[in-house]
Amino acid sequence: MFTGIIEEIGNIVSIKVNGDSRKLFIKADKILEDVHRGDSIAVNGICLTVTEFSDSEFSVDVMHETMKRTSLNKLKTNSKVNLERAMAANGRFGGHIVSGHIDGTGIVKNINKDSNAIWYTIEADLKIMKYVVEKGSITIDGISLTVANVRTNSFDVSIIPHTLENTILAFKKINDIVNIENDCIGKYVEKLMNKNKKESNINREFLLRNGF
């Protein structure tokens, strides 16, 4: 499990292509301080497993399914990536619950400066947008962010200077692809509500009538 608080920006040293899969070699510093083979590291929000490591880089295998569902197929040598180690049991919960399992990708449609902040408009499919709520949490390329505005097929997030300085969002341009993970709480609630529709009279109207 992750929290969406990026620890450092890594750099793609090389990519080994094997059919529809990839092996990524990533240069890093901070996250290698206590790394072990088999550890989970989120790369642009995607939970990947460390296969080998040295003092200055580590490698991960990326299967075909992950390549299809994420933006990793856009990475090239020298591409920058967000990195976060799995949360330690005694760590601070700085962001929100992030699984590292990407729901899909979005497209940067607009970037606007607003005083010391930068607004990003992200366009996404309806299967992602149905879980996006105003003031709710969302993960973009592994970054825990708060949704500011929601439309039918897009949403806005406002980025503070610290986030721009410490993540790859500063390098994003219009029409770039980003990885999106919805807040898992909404998905679990939907699953349980649908499962119990025939077994229970509890629905949205019932909850509203009773003050929820």
Image (cartoon, helix red, strand yellow):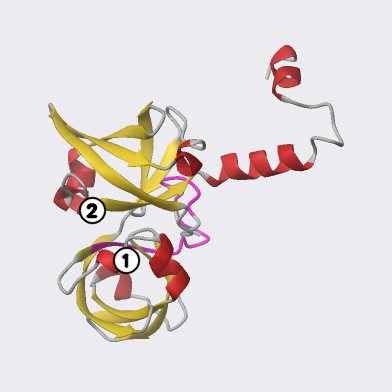
Whether 84 is among the magenta residues is yes
Viewer-side residue, 185 vs 37: 185
The percent position of residue 69, horizontal first and vertical second, equals: 42, 61
Q: Earlier in the sequence, mark 1 or mark 2?
A: 1
Q: Which mark is residue 92?
A: none
Quadrant placement of the C terminus: top right
Compared across the picture, whether 134 is left or right of 59 comes to right
Q: Specify the amino acid type for callout 2.
A: Thr
The residue identified by callout 1 is: 72
| Residue positioned most to the right | 199
User: Could you say where residue 122 lies in the image, as x and y percent from the top left?
Assistant: 30, 39
Could you say whether the residue bearing mark 1 is in a helix, strand or loop?
helix
Q: Residue drawn 53% across and 61% down?
A: 89
Residue holding disc 2: 167
The number of numbered badges drawn on the structure is 2
> Residue at the spot x=68%, y=44% of the render?
191
Give residue 134's position: percent from left, percent from top: 43, 27
The answer to whether 32 is drawn above or below residue 211 in the figure is: below
Task: Name the foreground residue: 150 vs 160.
Answer: 150
57 vs 197, nearest the viewer: 197
Q: As displayed, is residue 133 above or below residue 65?
A: above
Per the image, label 2 sits on a secondary structure element best described as: loop
Quadrant location of residue 34?
bottom left
